[in-house]
Amino acid sequence: MKAVAEHSLLLSTRQLRVFTSRSWYLVATLAQPLIWMVFLSGLLSGVARLPGFPAASYPQFLTPGMAAVGAMFGSAWAGLTMLMDLERGVLDRLLMSPVRRVAIITGNLIPQALIAVVQTLVLLAAALLLGVRYPGGPVGLTVMTAAVVLLALTVAALSNTLALRVRSREVQITVIQLLIFPFAFLSTAFMPEGLMASWLPTALNPVSWVVDASRTALSAQPDWPAVWLRLGLLTAVCTVSVLTAVNAFRSYQRSV
Amino acid sequence: MAGEPRTVAPARAAPAAHPAAIEVRSLVKTYPRGVRALDGISFSAARGEITAVLGPNGAGKSTLIKAMATLTGFDAGSIGVDGVDVRTRPAEVRRRIGVVSQSYSSDPSATGYDNLRLQARIYGLRGDRLRARLHELLDWMDLGSAAGRLVRTYSGGMRRRLELAMGLVHEPAVLVLDEPTAAVDPVAAEGLWSLVTELCRDRRMSVLLTTHQLDEADRLASWVVILNQGAVVVQGSPQDLKEELSGDVVAVRLTDPATARQVEAAMKRLAQVRNVAWTGAELRADIQGDARALGSVLEVLTAHSVTGPVSVSRPSLNDIYFRHAGGHR
Ligand SMILES: Nc1ncnc2c1ncn2[C@@H]1O[C@H](COP(=O)(O)OP(=O)(O)OP(=O)(O)O)[C@@H](O)[C@H]1O
Ligand SMILES: [Mg+2]
């Protein structure tokens, strides 16, 4: 256990270097959800006037959704880092060393989680300027950050699994592009459930779990059972995703 | 090239108290799409010595190394590294083996120092011991002044030396080198080999290497294993292998394909010619017997009006290699 933690830390430090050595990359990563936030708020401002809209303003409604979608968009590309290591032989070297398999995955995931946290905090601060308020206070903000981190870890782990199985950048990019938009728009991130066609499977979407848990936790009267249920689901999905990613090394090692 | 693998000298049995550096038994490996890369290989590499694995492209050398380094699994057989079974105790094998792969495995976007440092930290080195070890290795590999540069700015030879340093960081009992001199100039190769020989001698490190440079194997290795199409075709000490070819080798360049075919056929009909092999356009015939045997070979050449230069020499490891690992036109 100690070795796993130590190795995860070593490998995540290595990946975070990309951000510290290229500050424009960091700025672009953090700015992306802010840009979306501003233009979606303009684009969909009328939605807030529709009967049955559950929030005072569209930005107020959008903030948790933007945090979730931003984390998904960012961490979906985590597999490309794994692919790069694979192509450069770095992964083979790690697999021949005493590093535990799970540490290779967590070493790739931890940076994604950290980026998701910073991205969320920047977004929350920026949203204040748009008049968004957080009646749920620090507890609500913590719940939201935790949910976002679980989503980032899940998505990054699935992206790693895909990378280890397909081992091709082209396929990886195509599949990720194909998946992230449906998951973003078929969730409660941008539209309240009541305003969408009822056949859309939004409730099965982990992005919705993050958004719904965050919205209620940030409200003045949180529905705690609903929060716990979604955090529990997110934890379960996250665990399964990480284990699947670790298991993908097996299929990779059969083919090297 | 089917049939039983032959051992020219009696296979050396290691006493139980000192297991061989590497013990490979009936190893079979098939890749997912059905390529049988290793087809029942057995050999053992002695402790504190250099063992060379030779074979043409695609013979299975790299696959063998990946299997012993725990990177890739195998279907049947067993491998012991420093007395530890690869299948049942892979984690322990990883601590005892140092691997320098055929292709690069350092991170080009990090500095040489950072690459080496990460590798050392993975094996648990830290603090003063870590610094001392990195210093020693960088010094050894003559990379001290380049350590702070990104690896992508290194020359091929520098990069190879860094890879070697990374393989040595944890002072492995067994060092495995997959074609380490492939992209290295002759002077640097010489330096690399004197270092490896020194490690073998002074630190009792065991080394297994693959190479296409037959003279390297001849000079450095105490045991040579020749692979072809996933099987061991012959193994033995370089001396034993050369003694096996007791006669002379006649080499002649034949550029005209028609003459080449006729000469080859005529040579094969001679009782004194044991084997005919091609190195490009050069025909090499192993001949057995005294001067009369040589005479009849020369008669064949005269009969086909071959006028090019002809040489007669003692067999080299090359001849053993071409004889066993193909080279037939
Ligand atoms: N990852 C892989 N997937 C499928 N087949 C492979 C893979 N790697 C190697 N092979 C096949 O296995 C056989 C042995 O390859 P290997 O790389 O071990 O040869 P080698 O002796 O190292 O050759 P070289 O001298 O060219 O390095 C070849 O037929 C090769 O095509
Ligand atoms: Mg090879």
Image: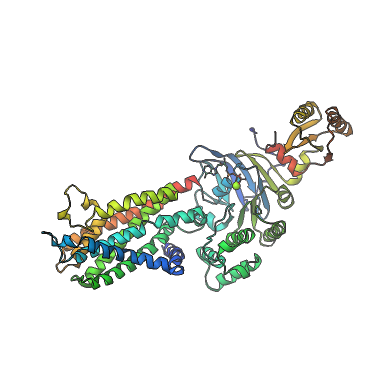
Where is A161 relative to A114, above or below? above
Where is B68 relative to B310, above or below? below
Answer with left or right where residue A234 lies relative to residue B239. left
Q: Quadrant of residue A210?
A: bottom left
Residue name at image x 47 percent, y 59 percent: A99
Looking at the picture, tell me which residue is in the foreground, A68 or B126: A68
Q: Quadrant of the C terminus of chain B?
A: top right
Colour option used: rainbow
Answer with left or right where residue A165 lies relative to residue B67. left
Badge count: 0
Residue name at image x 15 percent, y 64 percent: A55
From the top left corner, tell me how far across and down residue A219 is, in percent.
Answer: 17, 67
Looking at the picture, tell me which residue is in the foreground, B316 or B22: B316
From the top left corner, tell me how far across and down residue A163 is, in percent.
Answer: 42, 51
From the top left corner, tell me how far across and down residue B290 is, in percent.
Answer: 87, 34
Q: Quadrant of residue A157?
A: bottom left
In the picture as drawn, the residue positioned furthest to the left comes out as A51
Residue name at image x 17 percent, y 60 percent: A47
From the top left corner, tell me how far across and down residue B85 is, in percent.
Answer: 54, 50
Q: Quadrant of the N terminus of chain B?
A: top right
Where is B215 relative to A213, above or below? above
Q: Is residue A96 visible?
A: no
Where is B214 relative to A88, above or below? above
Q: Is residue B31 visible?
A: yes
